[in-house]
Image (cartoon, rainbow, N blue to C red):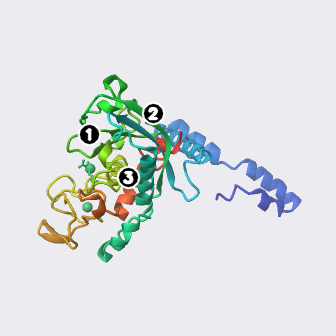
């Protein structure tokens, strides 16, 4: 603190004479004047000032609304949009609650199968990523469509779908009957707040009860929400590609089924034990049970007040 900026407490301990001087010097505490000068002459500083105040206001509002929990977790409001032709496709409220519970466990690192994380990777496990999920409402609509594609038709009423509810502040999930071989897909944060922003999951892979094995543990949801929160596939969508996370070992490509640990891949002449049990690989639901510390950092950057999905902190 600047010496000229006396606090009230300090002032109280001074003699009357000194107090007068202190009062005078407190009045002349020059921080605001210096700021005013800076803001007058520096447009970039003005922009930073505006961004700081906007971010501060957003954070305070979010806290008021309970979207930032006491432990600093961001409680993401979820809208589930169900497009159904058959009763099986009209997923029950119980099943929706199961899917939300899976997301909450997996993103908090409280999933019981976290105990299966190999010792080799235990120091890299994310544990609690500090995001939570909270169902706001369910929207249901009957359709005659038997199959959907990845063209976002389900996200617009004009194409037989359901319009997103406030995508800038709500996380929208669409559940559709079938997308052929596609279990689900997501938009990344560059789509934040747009009409197509969110995650799509085919009904057989949504929730647990009545879902289709080996994708019946709700992990398609975990994987797609990983994308929504800016995580890439662990193999970087290329042979020995990068997922922009340093602690996930580079691997040759996607893994499927239930691989046996340890599984070694060689990339750039380096042989590594790969983290196929990561949610961002393509293994079966029962074979994936962790995010890494590096992935947690990306998730948190995404929902931070300065991040691309800061809107989820306010509603
Ligand atoms: N987008 C991926 C797909 O459609 C999802 C993979 C999810 N993996 C899982 N085990 N549920 O293939
Ligand atoms: Zn994916
Ligand atoms: Ca990596």
SS for dot 1: loop
Residue 155 appears in the figure: yes
Q: Is residue 173 left or right of residue 273?
A: right
Depth-wise, is mark 1 or mark 3 nearer the camera? 3
Above/below status of 126 relative to 225: below
Residue extending farthest front? 87
Residue at image x 28%, y 54%? 215
Say which of 183 and 52 sits in front: 183
Residue 17 placement: quadrant: bottom right
Distance in Å between CA atoms under marks 1 and 2: 22 Å
Residue 278 appears in the figure: no
Give the mark nearest the N terminus, 1 or 2: 2
Neighbour tally class for label 3: few under 14, some 14-19, many 20 plus, Cα within 10 Å? some
Please provide percent x and percent y for residue 256: 19, 59
Neighbour tally class for label 1: few under 14, some 14-19, many 20 plus, Cα within 10 Å? many
SS for dot 3: loop
Beta carbon at label 3 within 8 Å of ligand 1: no
The residue labelled by disc 2 is 165
Q: How many marks?
A: 3
Residue 233 placement: quadrant: bottom left
Give the mark nearest the N terminus, 1 or 3: 1
The residue labelled by disc 3 is 209
Neighbour tally class for label 2: few under 14, some 14-19, many 20 plus, Cα within 10 Å? some
Please provide percent x and percent y for residue 80: 42, 40
Residue extending farthest bottom? 119
Depth-wise, is mark 2 or mark 3 nearer the camera? 3
The residue labelled by disc 1 is 178
């Amino acid at each position: 603190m600047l010496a000229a900026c006396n606090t009230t407490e300090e002032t109280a301990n001074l003699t009357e004479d000194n107090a007068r001087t202190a009062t005078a010097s407190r009045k002349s505490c020059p921080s605001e004047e210096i700021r005013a000068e800076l803001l007058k002459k520096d447009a970039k500083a003005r922009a930073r000032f505006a961004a700081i105040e906007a971010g501060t206001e957003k954070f305070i509002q979010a806290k008021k609304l309970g979207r930032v929990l006491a432990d600093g977790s961001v409680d993401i409001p979820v809208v589930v949009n169900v497009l159904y032709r058959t009763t099986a496709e009209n997923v029950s409220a119980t099943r929706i609650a199961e899917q939300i519970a899976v997301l909450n466990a997996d993103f908090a690192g409280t999933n019981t199968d976290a105990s299966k994380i190999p010792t080799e990777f235990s120091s890299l496990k994310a544990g609690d990523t500090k995001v939570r999920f909270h169902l706001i409402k369910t929207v249901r609509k009957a359709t005659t469509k038997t199959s959907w594609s990845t063209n976002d038709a389900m996200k617009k009423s004009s194409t037989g779908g359901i319009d997103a509810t406030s995508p800038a502040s709500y996380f929208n999930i669409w559940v559709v009957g079938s997308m052929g071989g596609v279990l689900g897909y997501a938009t990344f944060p560059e789509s934040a707040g747009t009409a197509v922003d969110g995650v799509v999951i085919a009904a057989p892979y949504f929730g647990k009860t009545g879902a289709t094995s080996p994708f019946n543990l709700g992990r398609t949801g975990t994987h797609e929400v990983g994308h929504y929160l800016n995580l890439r596939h662990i193999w970087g969508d290329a042979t020995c590609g990068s997922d922009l996370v340093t602690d996930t070992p580079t691997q040759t490509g996607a893994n499927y089924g239930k691989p046996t640990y340890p599984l070694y891949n060689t990339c750039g002449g380096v042989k590594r034990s790969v983290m196929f049990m990561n949610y961002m690989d393509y293994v079966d639901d029962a074979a994936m049970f962790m995010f890494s510390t590096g992935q947690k950092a990306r998730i948190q950057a995404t929902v931070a007040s300065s991040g691309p999905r800061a809107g989820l902190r306010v509603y």
